[in-house]
Image (cartoon, grey):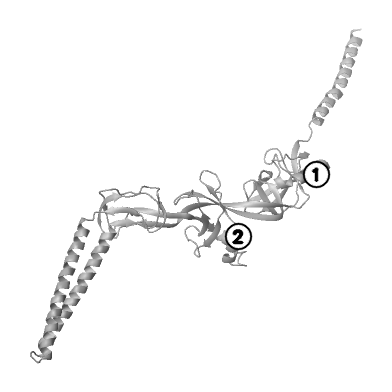
């Protein structure tokens, strides 16, 4: 009996084990089947028009920035203006000590009077000598001496007149006036300071900022692209360039558009760039010399393929996207893009075609080459603005 019982218990254990194994195997298979393909946003590409922008740091200068320097040396006795004040052409800015210059004028005027008296005396003598010569009372030699004295007196009179004019000019130079309309800059020297034409620091700067220049730089590559890689002239390209915008240092946009005026004909060997100048009207005087900002040059492109930058990744200096094939598998695909971009989207020049679907999320984190996904329509903010209809169509197709 003991042998039969042992056999029965062993058989029962074997049956239980056999029943348990298929059950465990079935549960494991079900867990694997419960892992669906991840939902990934995609967008279907379609040609569209975009307005890309190129941004360049810029320095602003008034149309004319004139350093104000005195033409004579003297101590400043009065400052007539203040920093930031608007002035008109000819308006007094500074007055220098006039005492010595007024004395020079008085001395020159006295010398002129003396010279004029000498001329009068010499003329009277010459006239008298001429009368005596005509009566043969004196010789020609004696008369000629009197005539020479008159000429010498006239020369001294001319010298005295020139000295008076020079003294009067120097006196006038003691009042330093503005050479143009504009805005007064920094005034480092005040009353009591010595002003001199040879001073390294000017008395101030007057900036005519009714119009301003925004200076920025273009690289050699930019210049070649501007001229169509040598197919056209830079001058013609400048004339055909659209109006440019100016972003101020606080991030706001200056309300008046400008125009690129000139491009330097020399490329700086140190920077590899050429200086460019854009002209802006400044009716309200908002822009001041020395300010900084950013020049924004629009670059419209028609019928191009645009992809979100976040839909791309880089590998060994090449850029890739994940193209979704008909089996909903992602395939890493190399693409070529325009160097110019707005920081949000890329313009594709090769590697993709209209109608291709690309993944716009999970790039670099979730996705791997050959992975099967569950495509979903990309949110409006994830797709380029003009591509919304195409994205919606892609969602319906799926």
In this view, the residue in front, 218 or 87, is 87
Horizontally, residue 4 falls left or right of residue 208, namely right
Q: Is residue 315 left or right of residue 357?
A: left
Tell me the tag on residue 315: none
For disc 1, the neighbor class at 10 Å (few under 14, some 14 to 19, many from 20) is few
Residue lying at the far left of the rendered structure: 137
Query: Residue 147: x percent and y percent?
Result: 15, 83
| Image point (13%, 78%), residue name | 122
Tell me: residue 18, above or below residue 42: above
SS type, badge 2 = loop
Name the residue beneath numbered marker 2: 241
Residue furthest top as drawn: 1
Mark in front: 2 vs 1: 2
Q: Badge 1 is on which residue?
A: 393
- Residue 318 lies, with reference to residue 148, above or below; the image says above
Against 269, residue 337 (above or below) is above
Towards the viewer: 155 or 254: 155
Q: Earlier in the sequence, mark 2 or mark 1?
A: 2
- Quadrant where the C terminus sits is top right
Residue at horizontal 53%, vertical 61%?
A: 261
């Amino acid at each position: 009996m003991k042998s039969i019982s042992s056999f029965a218990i062993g058989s029962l254990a074997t049956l239980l084990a056999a029943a348990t194994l298929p059950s465990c195997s079935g549960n494991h298979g079900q867990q694997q089947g419960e892992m669906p393909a991840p939902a990934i946003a995609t967008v279907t590409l379609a040609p569209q028009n975009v307005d890309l922008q190129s941004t360049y740091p810029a320095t602003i200068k008034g149309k004319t920035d004139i350093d104000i320097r005195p033409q004579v040396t003297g101590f400043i006795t009065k400052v007539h203006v203040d920093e930031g004040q608007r002035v008109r052409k000819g308006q007094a800015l500074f007055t220098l000590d006039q005492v010595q210059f007024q004395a020079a004028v008085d001395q020159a005027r006295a010398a002129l009077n003396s010279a004029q008296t000498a001329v009068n005396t010499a003329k009277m003598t010459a006239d008298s000598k001429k009368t005596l010569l005509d009566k043969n009372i004196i010789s020609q030699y004696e008369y000629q001496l009197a005539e020479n004295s008159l000429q010498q007196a006239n020369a001294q009179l001319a010298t005295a007149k020139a000295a008076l004019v020079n003294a009067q000019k120097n006196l006038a130079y003691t009042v330093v006036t503005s050479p143009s309309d504009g805005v007064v800059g920094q005034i480092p020297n005040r009353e009591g300071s010595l002003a001199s034409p040879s001073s390294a620091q000017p008395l101030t700067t007057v900036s005519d900022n009714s119009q301003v220049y925004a200076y920025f730089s273009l690289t050699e590559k930019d210049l070649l692209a501007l001229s169509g890689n040598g197919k056209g002239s830079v001058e013609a390209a400048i004339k055909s360039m659209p109006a440019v915008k100016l972003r101020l240092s606080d991030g706001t946009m200056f309300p008046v558009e400008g125009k690129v005026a000139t491009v330097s004909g020399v490329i700086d060997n140190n920077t590899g760039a050429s200086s460019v100048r854009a002209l802006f009207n400044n009716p309200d005087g908002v822009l001041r010399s020395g300010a900084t900002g950013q020049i924004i040059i629009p670059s419209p492109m028609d019928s191009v393929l645009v992809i979100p930058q976040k839909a791309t990744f880089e590998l060994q200096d090449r850029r890739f996207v994940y193209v979704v094939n008909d089996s909903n598998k992602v395939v890493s695909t190399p693409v070529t893009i325009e160097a110019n971009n707005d920081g949000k989207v890329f313009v594709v020049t090769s590697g993709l075609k209209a109608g291709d679907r690309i993944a716009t999320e999970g790039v670099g984190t979730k996705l791997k080459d050959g992975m099967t996904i569950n495509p979903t329509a990309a949110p409006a903010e994830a797709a380029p603005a003009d591509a919304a209809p195409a994205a919606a169509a892609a969602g319906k197709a799926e």
